[in-house]
Amino acid sequence: MVEAALRGEISIGTGLEESLTYCLDCRACESACPSRVKYHRVLEAGRHLLHSSRPSSLSFATRQLLRLVKHPSRLRMAINIGNRLKKFPHPASFQILTPFLGYAEQEIQPVARQPQSTSPVDFFEGCVMSAQFPDANQAAKNLLARGGLTVSSPIHQACCGALHLHSGHVEEAKELARQNIEAFETRTVPIVNTAGGCGAMLMQYDELLTDDVAWAERARKFSARVRDWATVFRTVAERVPLQGQNHRVALQNSCHLVNVEHAGEDSVKLLQNVPGDTFIPYSGQDRCCGSAGIYNIEHPDWALAILAEKMDTLESVHPDIIVVNNPGCHLQMRQGAIRRYGNGNMVQHLAVYLEYAAEKAENRRDGREQKHA
């Protein structure tokens, strides 16, 4: 149908529009397809056609969000204002966003550079991560530093462009890609990030810009350097003692981390090696939670139905903590935890959870050292 629409043989009618917009774009079909069809290319072409023919097909809230994520400082300001005014009535066009407000940023203090720090990595901050979850970014930087890595955050980096690409705004996504490539290409070290969706997008810059003669090779070199932070941390994790607090821990794995980066197992392995806590695997931990970028804004009823099924499964394993590794998942699972348990704080980013475990181990060690002294 998309091919026929691109050829002008059919219009971008209701049937095709529904198929394009109700797809989660979780990419699980690509992992399952024996022919390895890159379905996302079909989806993105169709959504670009939809956006070109119907620029206002997205909700007002989504259109504003796509503008804000290009300026993380403005996004952070908007989030802070929204949190302060959460109890007051919001304009109808923004009410869909209120369930995602209220996150209380954790106090994660930077750790001192470790004496053995040698291997450098570049850190991609991300728009939503830096605006809404800077504590997770800082926790990841701390853990990498504890493991002996030197972490730098290049200036002039931008939003990864994933939300724009998935919404059909292809040219905006390409412009953001070029800005990030330029910001990071002065070095050849790994580029790490804390958001599964961002990581998948960064890995695909070479595909996004493959027809751009001036940028194709630069994009290929950039994408080849991208790693999830947990993948890199696993290589040095044995240097970082961890100690749990007798918690049952479940994971909501990022779809794009699993299906695009093929790195979802790194989060699992790290969670399996926290002494004192019990990692509880469950059926569907790699399945989409219903966030899917802007899906829970554009199709809240469907997103909540997916979330309810997820929470039913989680409730059967009785977790104390639900770990996530993507900001969209974080916001969605917080909403689920609040609805089901009245406690959104039980949802933690993987980096924050592991940093707490590292602090616990460090405090225990320091206490023993003082006792022996």
Image: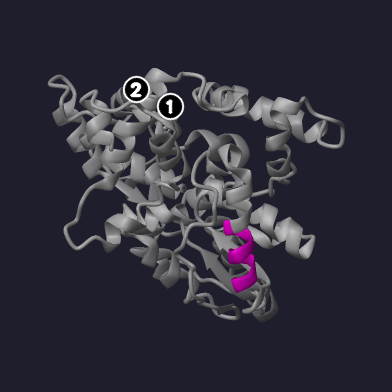
Could you say whether the residue bearing mark 2 is in a helix, strand or loop? helix
Give the total of numbered labels.
2
Q: Closer to the camera, 154 or 43?
A: 43
- 262 displayed left or right of 65: left
Residue appearing at x 55%, y 37% in the figure: 128
Q: Is residue 63 magenta?
A: no
Place residue 94 in its image quadrant: top right
Q: Amino acid at mark 1?
A: Ala
Which mark is on residue 190?
A: none
**Image point 15% across, 19% down: which residue?**
214
Q: Toward the viewer: 195 or 147?
A: 195
- Residue 365 in view of the camera: no
**Is residue 367 shown left or right of residue 120?**
right
Instruction: Indicate yes or no whether the magenta region holds residue 308.
Output: yes
Q: Is residue 230 above or below residue 265?
A: above
Mark 2 vs 1, N-terminal side: 1
Q: Amino acid at mark 2?
A: Gln
Q: Are marks 2 and 1 in contact (CB under 8 Å)?
A: yes
Relative to residue 4, is residue 264 depicted above or below? below
Q: Secondary structure at mark 1?
A: loop
- Which residue has dot 2 on it? 179
User: Looking at the rendering, in which quadrant would you find the N terminus?
Assistant: top left
Our reading of the magenta stretch's main secondary structure is helix
- What residue range appears in magenta? 306-313
Residue picked out by circle 1: 158
Residue 295 picture location, percent across and down = 53, 42
Residue 335: percent from the left, percent from the top? 69, 52
